[in-house]
């Protein structure tokens, strides 16, 4: 029987915002406005119709993958979006139970040779927010041009088409796929689980503790670490929950974000020294915080370690001639120090250390072997940052070397030096405050030569992205930088994932060969200088918050 396609008018279309760093994130109430989701989805469908009708593009496969994190309302949203995609002529593959991590979605898109995927997640934002990310046939997040086109099309929608879910299912236009299995198979292929199991058999007592934060991580971690690797692992908050853990003791929603503010139990377990490896992942499992035996590692540092052992996952085989390893502009420069090392390791390749804007789409575009400041590490076999991959790769290195996480990391710092790194933020809800902050940062060069707190401002400006392959410049400045004396560097940029107000992310870095010290005394002068700079420039925003205490600091003094 032919499918019955229904069409309904949207009498009062909404004004839909543009996707930011990673998808469009809004509070639940905004996504739940009548016909908002329908309008959003119809705009996405229009975009894919246009794309897949183009003769010259390879993405003419009319299949789309849909899935996401377990947050409130997502299972229904997955069904509704599927109905609309089928109504627009697509075949839809839905993740089993609607649940999939962002990296698993990226992998599934490639495996199914789909035209793209729609990922329902607001990632680290609490369950009170909803987010939708869009990925392309390469598995990578949509880039600027696509985002702009989708945005324009969404705001032209006047009606939407759909097919009732059950009839689309019966007609085979909607199918279900086990993303967990597909993803675990890939990791097995890349990391060789058989060899890891053999190594684990020789390490009785080797133990793990993980925190799945009630996001999508539980089923993935269980399958990979317990079912397939046979690891003795405790998984905290394993069950995916629609409230992602609910409220904290003060009645605030918990953030499914792997930083120290939100993983108290795991920190306690790690402090016992009993666990060889520990990890926490965010709600869509693309970010991680790894550690073990009382030690936690920053993502940039962990990536330097991964670069050192890159041959364990055959990175050189993935890149025929040129290896790109990327880091977002604000990520600590530890890995840049490793370029020479990688050139020696892979003499047949040209190695490029590339700084990219924040947002993993840029790193994905270069082959996905890279890292972001906020605990995102790339898995070069897919096109997204990937929390479980990072933890499993760390596990492989632990088993291969017999060293502890701390010994491994100290080995890297001894050889290459350490880039002390910390993040902070200036946030508020006053638009005028934001405008003032922006103009101060834009004009920062005029303050060069001044001394702020104990540091002299030597250079200031904005950082522009020149694409390493096309040599095109991105049209907006991506980050502001303030170079203070003694190698103290601050970069700052506005967050693109919030659902209200503004957040200026402030990143402080300083290189030193003396690595075994707490980071606070190293980064404090930068924070003081930045505060003094803002105050001196007339910014009176009060909400300066440096989140040092919620980040890994292996040497607490
Ligand atoms: C934040 C992080 C960025 C990350 C983005 C999406 O963006 O800083 O590194 O790519 O979240 O991550 P922003 O613009 O708020 O600083 V995920 O795990 O939420 O998709
Ligand atoms: Co995420």
Image (cartoon, rainbow, N blue to C red):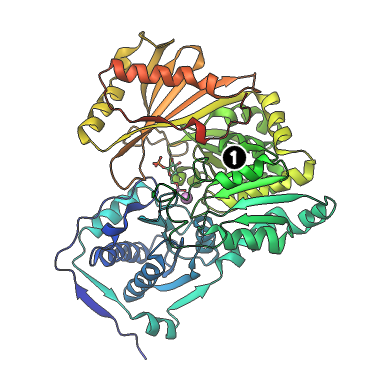
Looking at the image, which residue is at 66% across and 32% down? 343
Work out which residue is located at the far left of the displayed protein and give it. Answer: 11
Mark 1 is surrounded, within 10 Å at the Cα level, by few (under 14), some (14 to 19) or many (20 or more) other residues, namely: some
Q: Residue furthest right?
A: 202
Q: Nearer the viewer, residue 53 or 536?
A: 536
Above or below — where is 533 with respect to 46?
Answer: above
For the N terminus, the quadrant is bottom left
Report which residue position mark 1 lands on.
Answer: 322
Which element type, helix, strand or loop, lies under badge 1? strand
Residue at screen point 61% across, 67% down: 181
Against 17, is 13 above or below? Answer: below
Q: Is residue 302 left or right of residue 45?
A: right
Instruction: Specify whether 10 is left or right of 466.
Output: left
In this view, the residue in front, 468 or 35, is 35
Instruction: Give the x, y percent position of residue 365.
Output: 48, 46
Quadrant containing the C terminus in the rendered view: top right
**Residue located 29% across and 60% down the image:** 31
Image height of 371 relative to 97, above or below: above
Q: Could you tell me residue 542's position as x and y percent? A: 30, 27
């Amino acid at each position: 029987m032919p499918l019955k396609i229904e069409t309904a008018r949207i009498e009062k279309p909404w004004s839909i915002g543009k996707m930011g760093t990673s998808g469009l994130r809004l509070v639940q109430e905004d996504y739940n406005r009548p016909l908002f989701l329908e309008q959003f989805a119809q705009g996405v469908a229009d975009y894919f119709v246009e794309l897949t009708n183009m003769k010259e593009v390879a993405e003419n496969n009319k299949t789309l993958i849909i899935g996401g994190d377990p947050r409130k309302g997502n299972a229904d949203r997955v069904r509704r979006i599927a109905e609309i995609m089928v109504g627009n002529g697509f075949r839809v593959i839905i993740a089993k139970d609607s649940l999939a991590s962002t990296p698993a979605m990226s992998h599934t898109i490639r495996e199914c040779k789909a035209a793209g995927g729609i990922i329902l997640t607001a990632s680290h934002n609490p369950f009170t927010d909803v987010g939708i990310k869009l990925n392309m046939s390469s598995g990578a997040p949509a880039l600027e041009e696509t985002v702009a086109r989708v945005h324009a099309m969404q705001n032209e929608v006047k009606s939407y088409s759909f097919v009732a879910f059950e009839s689309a299912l019966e007609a085979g236009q909607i199918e279900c796929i086990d993303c967990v299995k597909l993803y675990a198979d890939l990791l097995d292929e890349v990391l060789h689980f058989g060899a890891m199991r053999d190594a684990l058999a020789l390490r009785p007592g080797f133990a793990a503790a993980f925190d799945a934060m009630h996001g999508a991580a539980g089923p993935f971690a269980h399958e990979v670490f317990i079912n397939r690797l046979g690891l003795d692992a405790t998984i905290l908050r394993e069950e995916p929950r629609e409230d992602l853990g609910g409220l904290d003791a003060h009645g605030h929603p918990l953030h499914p974000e792997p930083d120290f503010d939100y993983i108290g139990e795991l920190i306690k377990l790690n402090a016992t020294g009993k666990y060889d490896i520990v990890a926490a992942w965010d709600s869509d499992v693309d970010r991680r915080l790894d550690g073990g035996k009382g030690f936690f590692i920053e993502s940039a540092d962990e990536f330097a370690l991964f670069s050192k052992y890159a041959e364990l996952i055959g990175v050189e085989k993935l890149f025929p001639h040129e290896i790109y390893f990327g880091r977002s502009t604000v990520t600590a420069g530890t890995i840049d120090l490793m370029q020479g090392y990688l050139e020696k390791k892979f003499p047949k390749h040209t190695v490029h250390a590339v700084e990219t804007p924040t947002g993993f789409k840029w790193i994905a575009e270069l082959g996905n072997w890279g890292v972001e400041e906020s605990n995102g590490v790339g898995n070069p076999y897919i096109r997204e940052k990937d929390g479980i991959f990072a933890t499993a790769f760390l596990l492989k290195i632990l088993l291969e070397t017999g060293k502890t996480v701390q010994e491994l990391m100290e080995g890297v710092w001894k050889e290459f030096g350490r880039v002390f790194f910390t993040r902070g933020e200036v946030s508020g809800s006053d638009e005028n405050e934001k405008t003032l902050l922006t103009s101060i940062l834009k004009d920062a060069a005029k303050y060069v030569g001044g001394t702020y707190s104990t540091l002299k401002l030597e250079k200031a400006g904005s950082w522009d992205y020149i694409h390493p392959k096309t040599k095109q410049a991105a049209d907006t400045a991506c980050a502001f930088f303030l170079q203070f004396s003694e190698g103290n560097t601050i970069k700052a940029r506005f967050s693109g994932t919030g659902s209200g107000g503004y957040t200026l992310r402030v990143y402080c870095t300083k290189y030193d060969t003396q690595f075994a010290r707490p980071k606070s005394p190293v980064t404090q002068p930068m924070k003081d200088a930045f505060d003094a700079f803002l105050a001196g420039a007339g910014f009176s925003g009060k909400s300066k918050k440096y989140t040092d205490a919620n980040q890994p600091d292996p040497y607490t003094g």
